[in-house]
Image (cartoon, grey):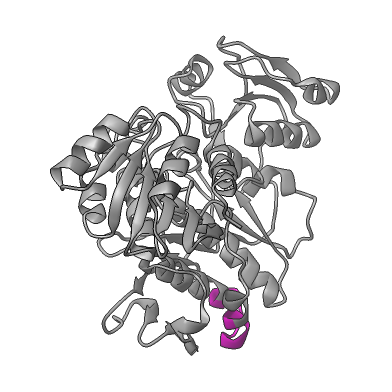
């Protein structure tokens, strides 16, 4: 744990969940706190706690320290002024890590990080350890400082945005599950996005655990370790598949038939979870029990019901093409795919190629529907343009035959028609119920 500077004047930029938690934590640590947001926000609770709120405002604020919410771009004037002045700018997870001595595990990746975060926290708890999932998964890390026991493992989902301003953040174990183009509306190129992800490992020590995909190495002192999804494990493999899940030092943990998560991508999530749980001290039987009892994550390959032999699956969290392709891997035949949403600057050619086998018809919605349609047409995948999600679900259900899967895997962000992927998933659930799913 790195030291906090003596209290002074702090500026918090952005007042969503993490910004609010950071503002309260700074106040509790004795700082004078000013919080700004580009939009009007209900901040009566912060103001009553002695925090000065300026919203809406984009005026620069002199400060000794700035804490940046992940959704705020670097060009926002108060942030740009802080960077230009050389003022320290931290992510909320950097602030929280300096304010706690709790052991930390960090999980990042373009896809799979929420499932792995929730799964790892569950496995640790089932193995008898205190653990809380936090970070990008929904609970700000800063809100847990002083609220959980000192031996509680903080399992932190880390987005690329959260990893941009972390001068000392050090997880005891960390994994980069995968990295494919995403958020290209926020980064100048793919290399910049990948560098942000690699910041997760920059401050690790030689006794920490760093798990990365082939072709990438840890940027700190921890030795790089690999997940081996197929073939013989290499000398740096920490977890691998060979007739089941194996972990270095533990041997066979469980056959794949005992693990309920579907899809090749989930095998990697499971392997990473098992390796990190072993690093925390759990044995094979404890890890196997946790994996077998995991209930899954809402909006991630969530079976919401069945009607007349048709299964309805909510993967609203598939917010980029790679995630949607992973969903098709889990359901490799007779799929009626619902896709589309707001653009993140990614192409859809790979998605169309993956759809050419299993997808009977794609029902396309949102602002990206024409672009996805063009890609589908190039691969001779049948498609229809639909005005909204409920209509798409209704038409897919009407077209479906017993054995078909109506799969929401949008491959896009949700902000053209919804407040977030959770809202989109709830709308899908309701539409599936209207179609008779139970």
Magenta highlight: main SS: helix
Q: Residue furthest bottom?
A: 251
Residue 3 seen by the camera: no
Q: Which residues are magenta?
A: 278-288
Residue 363 seen by the camera: yes
Taking the image as shown, residue 371 lies to the left or right of residue 329, namely left
Q: Nearer the viewer, residue 203 or 145?
A: 145
Q: Quadrant of residue 74?
A: top left
Q: Position of residue 346 (x, y in %)?
A: 28, 38
Q: Residue furthest right?
A: 48
Taking the image as shown, residue 189 lies to the left or right of residue 185, namely left
Q: Quadrant of residue 293?
A: bottom right
The structure residue drawn at horizontal position 49% and vertical position 74%, both measured from the top left corner, is 275
The structure residue drawn at horizontal position 30% and vertical position 48%, both measured from the top left corner, is 361
Q: Position of residue 189 (x, y in %)?
A: 26, 35
Q: Position of residue 217 (x, y in %)?
A: 32, 61
Q: Nearer the viewer, residue 2 or 340?
A: 340
Taking the image as shown, residue 167 lies to the left or right of residue 28, namely left
Q: Quadrant of the C terminus?
A: bottom right
Q: Nearer the viewer, residue 438 or 190?
A: 438
Q: Nearer the viewer, residue 162 or 83?
A: 162
């Amino acid at each position: 744990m790195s030291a906090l500077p003596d209290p002074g004047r702090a500026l918090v930029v952005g007042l969503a969940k993490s910004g609010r938690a950071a503002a309260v934590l700074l106040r509790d640590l004795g700082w004078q706190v000013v919080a700004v947001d580009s939009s009007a926000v209900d901040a009566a609770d912060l103001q009553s706690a002695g925090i000065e709120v300026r919203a809406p405002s984009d005026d620069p604020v002199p400060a000794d320290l700035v804490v940046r919410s992940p959704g705020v771009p670097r060009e926002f004037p108060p942030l740009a002024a802080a960077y230009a002045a050389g003022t320290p700018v931290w992510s909320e997870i950097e602030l929280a890590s300096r304010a706690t001595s709790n052991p930390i595990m960090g999980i990042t990746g373009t896809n799979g990080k929420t499932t792995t975060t929730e799964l790892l926290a569950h496995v640790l708890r089932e193995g008898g350890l205190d653990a809380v999932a936090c970070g990008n998964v929904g609970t700000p890390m800063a809100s847990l400082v002083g609220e959980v026991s000192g031996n509680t493992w903080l399992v932190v989902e880390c987005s690329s945005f959260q990893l941009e301003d972390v001068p000392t953040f050090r997880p005891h174990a960390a994994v980069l599950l995968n990295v494919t183009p995403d958020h290209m509306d926020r980064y100048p190129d793919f290399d910049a996005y990948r560098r942000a992800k690699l910041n997760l490992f920059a401050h690790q020590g030689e006794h920490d655990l760093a798990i990365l995909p082939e072709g990438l190495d840890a940027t700190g002192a921890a030795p790089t370790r690999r997940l081996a999804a197929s073939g013989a494990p290499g000398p740096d493999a920490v977890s691998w598949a060979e007739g089941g899940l194996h972990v270095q030092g533990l041997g066979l943990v469980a056959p794949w038939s005992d693990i309920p998560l579907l899809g090749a991508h989930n095998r990697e999530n499971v392997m990473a979870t098992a390796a990190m749980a072993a690093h925390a001290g759990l044995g094979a039987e404890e890890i196997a029990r946790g994996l077998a009892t995991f209930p899954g994550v809402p909006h991630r390959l969530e079976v919401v019901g069945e009607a007349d032999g048709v299964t309805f699956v909510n993967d609203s969290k598939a917010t980029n093409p790679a995630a949607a392709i992973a969903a098709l891997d889990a359901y490799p035949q007779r799929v009626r795919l619902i896709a589309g949403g707001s653009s993140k600057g990614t192409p859809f050619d790979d998605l169309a190629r993956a759809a050419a086998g299993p997808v009977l018809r794609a029902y396309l919605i949102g602002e990206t529907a024409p672009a996805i349609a063009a890609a589908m047409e190039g691969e001779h995948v049948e498609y229809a343009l639909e005005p909204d999600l409920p209509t798409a679900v209704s038409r897919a259900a009407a077209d479906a035959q017993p054995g078909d899967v109506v799969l929401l895997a949008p491959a896009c962000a949700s902000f053209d028609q919804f407040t977030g992927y959770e809202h989109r998933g709830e709308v899908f659930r309701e539409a599936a119920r209207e179609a008779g799913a139970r």
